[in-house]
Structures are given as C-alpha cells and as structure tokens.
Image (cartoon, grey):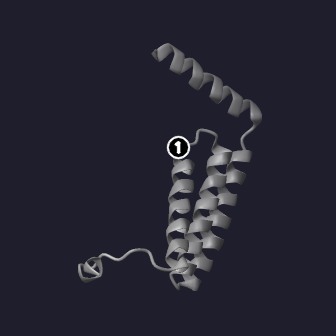
C-alpha cells in the first residue's frame, strides 16, 4: 500500500509482462545486430529486432506504426542490405576478409 502511494507499483498484469518481454527481446536482437561480425547474421538480427519493435508498437496500441515499421524496416531495408551484400563477388569478400586478418596480425 505504501508503494502504491509513492507511485511505485509492481507488475500486475500479463499484458505488462508481455510488454517487458517484447522490449527486452527488441534490445537483445538489436544489440546482436550491432555486435555480430558476420554481416548476413547481423542483418537477420536487425530484421528480427525490428519485428519485435513492431510488436511493441502493436502492444502499445499503435497498429499503423507497427505495420509501417514491419514493412519498411524489417522487410524492405533488410532485403536491401542482403541484396547489396550478395552483389559483391565471392572473391572480393574473401580477399577483404584475408586482408583484414593480415592487418590485425601485423598490428599486434
């Protein structure tokens, strides 16, 4: 009762638990997208993180924003990144990986 008067309340409904879980998963997948080294997996994590962000918009009562975010960020941008990544020839990708690893060894 004292906590309620002070403005501090506990999580009371399953709806609030759902909001917290969706937001935690959003942050988790977007951090993975930033930190992961392989570009294809980072793009997939970005798309999944944006899908969870769209779910959080839907849970909060903004369905139009949720649909726009899901179609633009999770769909179009992720597909654009994947298609641009696949336009490079495999030799260029492997050469770039070898050069970066050689530079890392020389720096040490």
Q: Is residue 27 above or below residue 95?
A: below
Residue found farthest to the right = 90
Position of residue 6 measured from the top left corner of the image (x, y, whole percent): 23, 78
For this view, does 95 lie left or right of residue 101?
Answer: right
For this view, does 91 lie left or right of residue 15?
Answer: right
Q: Is residue 84 above or below residue 67?
A: above
Viewer-proximal residue among 60 and 17? 17
Please name the residue shown 63% across and 60% down the image.
Answer: 47
Please name the residue shown 52% across and 85% down the image.
Answer: 61
Q: Quadrant of the N terminus?
A: bottom left
Please name the residue shown 46% across and 17% down the image.
Answer: 107
For this view, does 7 lie left or right of residue 104?
Answer: left
Viewer-proximal residue among 90 and 49? 49
Viewer-proximal residue among 17 and 2? 2
Q: Which residue is mark 1?
A: 35
Please name the residue shown 52% across and 48% down the image.
Answer: 34
Q: Is residue 23 above or below residue 4?
A: above
Position of residue 105 measured from the top left corner of the image (x, y, whole percent): 53, 16
For this view, does 37 lie left or right of residue 27?
Answer: right
Mark 1 secondary-structure assignment: helix
């Amino acid at each position: 009762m004292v906590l309620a008067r002070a403005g501090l309340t506990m999580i009371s409904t399953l709806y609030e638990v759902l909001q917290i879980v969706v937001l935690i998963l959003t942050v988790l997948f977007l951090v993975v997208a930033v930190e992961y080294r392989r570009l294809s997996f980072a793009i997939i994590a970005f798309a999944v993180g944006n899908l969870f962000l769209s779910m959080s918009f839907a849970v909060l009562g903004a369905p139009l924003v949720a649909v726009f975010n899901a179609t633009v960020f999770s769909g179009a941008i992720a597909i654009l990144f994947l298609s641009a990544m696949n336009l490079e020839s495999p030799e260029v990708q492997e050469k770039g990986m070898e050069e970066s690893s050689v530079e890392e060894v020389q720096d040490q």
